[in-house]
Image: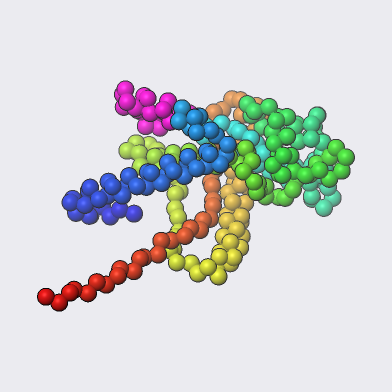
Amino acid sequence: MINKTQKRGATGAVANDAGSHFQEVLHSVVDFLLIGGMSVADIQAVVAARLLPATEKKSVPGKRGAIANTVGVDTVSALVLHRWYRDEDLLDEQALPIAIRLYGHYPSVEALALSEGSIVPARSIALAMKSSGLIKKVSRGLYAPEARVGTINTLHPVLVEHASKSLVRFLETIQRNTSPDKDKLSLIERFTHIPDLPIEDLRAFQVFSQGHGSSFLAGVDDWLESRRQRGVHRKKKSGLAAGIHVFAYVEKTKQPTKKSRVRAKPA
């Protein structure tokens, strides 16, 4: 974090430091796109097309594609799992999700996805949930959720979509919180960080962060779901996409290099 009271002479150093951070962002994005299967030629074409308007005239801040506001496969998949664990018609006597068909009329995964009104075909969403491991086949033609909290452990296209949207949403939150527009309410953007967690405590950190993060998100999820626009109300009123993304991270810190001492030769 930059101290606002720093000396004016340090402006150049701050600018250089910010430039290196921007390079890290671009490197990470390019690496992610390559791992996700995007070709070098496609990446170059997208970057060139995005930079072209900036060379002609000043680009308008915040004017970008609607990727963060589209109801995509990742969002609908989460909504399907949420309903599957809460709708009385989809629960057995032990309040566990019943097995349903993948396609067809309700109850089916396709029907649940269709009810969310995504521009993505409901059948494609059902197939993506199957191929990503969010649902599993339990008997002939019937499927059930793999777990209450859906996780994807491979770089599946659904996960690529989710990660891409998360980056866009995070940057838009930063822009919103630093906007001079006083009518824009700021959103939570906080982090906690230490540079020297002992390696032997990594497992404990994993368990601790997953437990507390899951509890926090469960409460937020219930709050948001209770305020969703349903049926006719969804068509009459305009709504906002809203949510919270929580993730933990670990990274290797650069160890300070030991400066070798050079003895001065006697005159």
Region of the chain picked out in magenta, as a range: 46-66
Q: Is residue 58 visible?
A: yes
Is residue 26 left or right of 144 when viewed as pictured?
Answer: left
Q: Position of residue 158 (x, y in %)?
A: 63, 38
Q: Position of residue 152 (x, y in %)?
A: 65, 46
Is residue 211 left or right of 55 when viewed as pictured?
Answer: right
Which residue is found at the position 51% from the left and 56% from the top? 249
Q: Is residue 57 magenta?
A: yes
Q: Is residue 173 visible?
A: no
Quadrant location of the N terminus? Answer: bottom left
**How many numbered marks appear?**
0
Which residue is found at the position 44% from the left and 39% from the top? 172
Q: Position of residue 123 (x, y in %)?
A: 73, 29
Quadrant location of the C terminus? Answer: bottom left
Is residue 67 left or right of 129 when viewed as pictured?
Answer: left
Farthest residue, direction bottom: 266
